[in-house]
Amino acid sequence: MERAHAITALAGENIESVVSVLDAVRVSGATTRPEIARVTRLGRNVVTDRAAQLIAAGLLTEGPLGRSTGGRAPRELRFNAAAGVILVADLGATSIEVATADLAGSISNARGEAADVTLGPTHILSRVAELFDELVDSLPGDAHVWGVGVGLPGPVEFDTGRPVSPPIMPGWDGYDVRSFFASRYHAPVWVDNDVNVMALGELRGGLAAGHQDVVFVKIGTGIGAGLVSRGLLHRGAQGCAGDIGHMAVGESTVQCRCGQLGCLEALAGGHALGRDGLELAHSGQSPVLAGELAAGHEVTAQSVVDAALRGDPAARRLVTESARLLGGALARVVNFFNPSLILIGGGVASAGDLYLSQVRLAVLGRSLPLATRHLEILQSPLADRAGLRGAAFMVVDELLSPAGLSRTHDQLLIS
Amino acid sequence: MERAHAITALAGENIESVVSVLDAVRVSGATTRPEIARVTRLGRNVVTDRAAQLIAAGLLTEGPLGRSTGGRAPRELRFNAAAGVILVADLGATSIEVATADLAGSISNARGEAADVTLGPTHILSRVAELFDELVDSLPGDAHVWGVGVGLPGPVEFDTGRPVSPPIMPGWDGYDVRSFFASRYHAPVWVDNDVNVMALGELRGGLAAGHQDVVFVKIGTGIGAGLVSRGLLHRGAQGCAGDIGHMAVGESTVQCRCGQLGCLEALAGGHALGRDGLELAHSGQSPVLAGELAAGHEVTAQSVVDAALRGDPAARRLVTESARLLGGALARVVNFFNPSLILIGGGVASAGDLYLSQVRLAVLGRSLPLATRHLEILQSPLADRAGLRGAAFMVVDELLSPAGLSRTHDQLLIS
């Protein structure tokens, strides 16, 4: 706890230069005080003073002597990613994943379990807290929780950490997720939509690193997107930007859970694939899926993807039709948002190139040539836990930025 | 010229604090050194030193004594918007508008004329330069051009000031618009897409002030949008974000100039309205438009809008159908981008509430309730010259920001 407060002590009048010095080491890779002075354009005395503050807060450590450039060899400074521990949770419609992370966003001790988000916030968050407590108990005695990051499967008002009318999370509307964890761990808490968090994970430590304008698409049960504009998450006015699942993609009699007809999600999402796959199994049009059903297995989106990858023609048609519809929707997104990268993640994307090549074809067929000239469309590596990493970066970015340090300070005064 | 160089002298090691002090006066409205110290969290001595630099550069002036709060009354500092003059031009498909602006974005000496952008950059830009020269000649002898801002009717690579494959500007692809003006006026030059510039004009000094997430739609001959994310323009990877004109909005046999069928612009833009209006005139379905034609007047989008406002039923149907199609496209934009404000400008928007109420209806009919809960859809006041004002703010924002000052410095070293 003391460390969590030590960091907020940095939020004084020199906050801009303190963070500049930290960023010079942490982000730009400067290691000596003269290098830091060059990168930050701060005076040598200022750099020395701010570095001393950061060493006292545990964020920088003094390393061995660096190379001499003529005079006395300068000491190397290093970012101490182990100074603090962050607790992260990624909640899906049917799952909880938790882990610890260091201040560089590296994930440890990840574990997950099935959970039904419709059971409501008290039930689900209590279970997350139990899992967090186990993680905390396993930490070394001097480790301190510096922050908590949570991804939720619905729109979130980022400034307050409260879900806003989340469609698949009954009972969660307006729930104070931040206070729930802040009071338990006496640490600042940030909460965001799971797809935003995944986009952030890819942006800060994944395939999207170095890109400024990115669309991250998750095709799970539903379909959603996380948007990056000029290197920052675009959350929108109510925190619900990136909703491509309810884009109208053609004439259809299939009603979406939102009440409309012809929504992308109702035709191309994981739920739709499972529903249509079950029909193929019942009708016998898909021998592979009929076999699954006969063997007593449930027919899910994943079974359809697996059957398609095994060459089952009917399952393949379902998968490529989903990709074609998604590609058509993304063509509009490309013209409107002009990203340099589209990353596609979520269970259905595990169909890999079978899926991606059809998406690419549909995007190219309807987008403006200029907008696709340098556009990459790639699969987000599923195993890489983009959600947990993103939740960690969400906390690190807030903790170690000038505005974030002020907000951290405010949160700790209140909690 | 000396003044233009005086400002770049500010781009030294104290640049962050210099701009902080300037912003405290210019944007936050602080007037005394103690107030500036409070707003910026800089020390009193630092504020005094940076204020002296800004006074020397002509950006701040020392005013009368402020109110005493007990001790010696502090002197008031004021932002000197008249320190520099900016030349601005807003180029459309068929028009040139030019003006001068001060450093607060206030427009003076505006004048415009018809011009055909397809005549190519040498012809059009030479004419802009002639108009600029007349403006410069009319300035007081001690006035200095601090920067040039230009809006163009096509995608622009903002960092270099070059058009990128602009569809309605043959001969302009890759043309170095920046150098053309930089060499003439020895001042830094910024160039952007006209709709982005208009969006910036509304954001920094118009109806969008205070909003973070905005979509500005221009329905002229074609249809385009300028996007604002977290208070900054979202230009996209190739500078062509906001292209909603070629969004597919339904089955149609009308071919767009882009080669596709069913584009929003080909069905609902100004060109489409003029084309369909002429048909109504020829067929006699619209008595008002038939009368225009008989009187030897050209039937344009504006004639259709005027006829609709005079109650002509057939013209009214054209206008409301355009609004319905635009609203359907904007519903997708609302779900995807979640703006708090949509501003609609351009000639067709002069139909006012007849148009806007139909757009609102179509947006509400297909958007997610959460995304429209606090959404405003308003007409951009046409008379307010959002394009010229935006071009001025584009220059001011660049000139008076830390990154912009560095780039200004680089531009002046090169030119």
Image (cartoon, coloured by chain):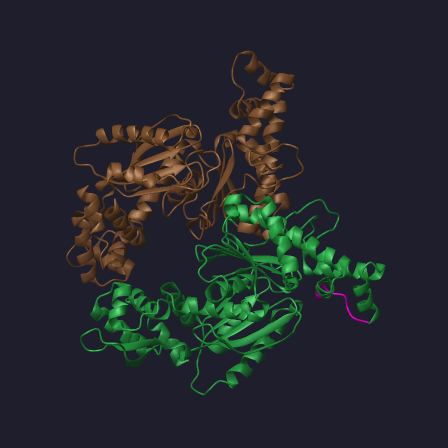
Chain colours: A green, B brown
Report if residue A257 is visible in the image. no
In the image, taking residue A361 as reference, residue B405 lies left or right, namely left
In the rendered view, tell whether residue B326 sits above or below residue A302. above
- Residue B228 falls inside the magenta stretch: no
Residue A3 at x, y = what percent?
A: 38, 79
In the rendered view, tell whether residue B300 sits above or below residue A361. above
Q: Quadrant of residue A292?
A: bottom right
Question: In the current view of this chain or complex, which residue is farthest to the top?
Answer: B295
Q: Main secondary structure of the magenta part?
A: loop
Q: Work out whether residue B106 or residue B163 is closer to the camera in this orientation and state it.
A: B163
Residue A408 at x, y = what percent?
A: 41, 69
- Point 66% across, 33% down: residue: B253
Residue A257 at x, y = what percent?
A: 69, 55
Q: Work out whether residue A32 or residue A3 is closer to the camera in this orientation and state it.
A: A32
- Point 37% across, 48% down: residue: B159
In the rendered view, tell whether residue B368 sits above or below residue B165. below
In the image, taking residue B14 as reference, residue A104 lies left or right, namely right
- Image quadrant occupied by the C terminus of chain A: bottom left
- Image quadrant occupied by the N terminus of chain A: bottom left
Question: In the current view of this chain or complex, which residue is farthest to the left?
Answer: B72
Q: Quadrant of residue B18?
A: bottom left
In the rendered view, tell whether residue B293 sits above or below residue B339. above
- Point 42% across, 30% down: residue: B117
Residue B185 at x, y = what percent?
A: 25, 37
Residue span colored magenta: A296-302
Report if residue B402 is visible in the image. yes
Q: Work out whether residue A246 or residue B242 is closer to the camera in this orientation and state it.
A: B242
**Looking at the image, how many numbered discs can be counted on the residues?**
0
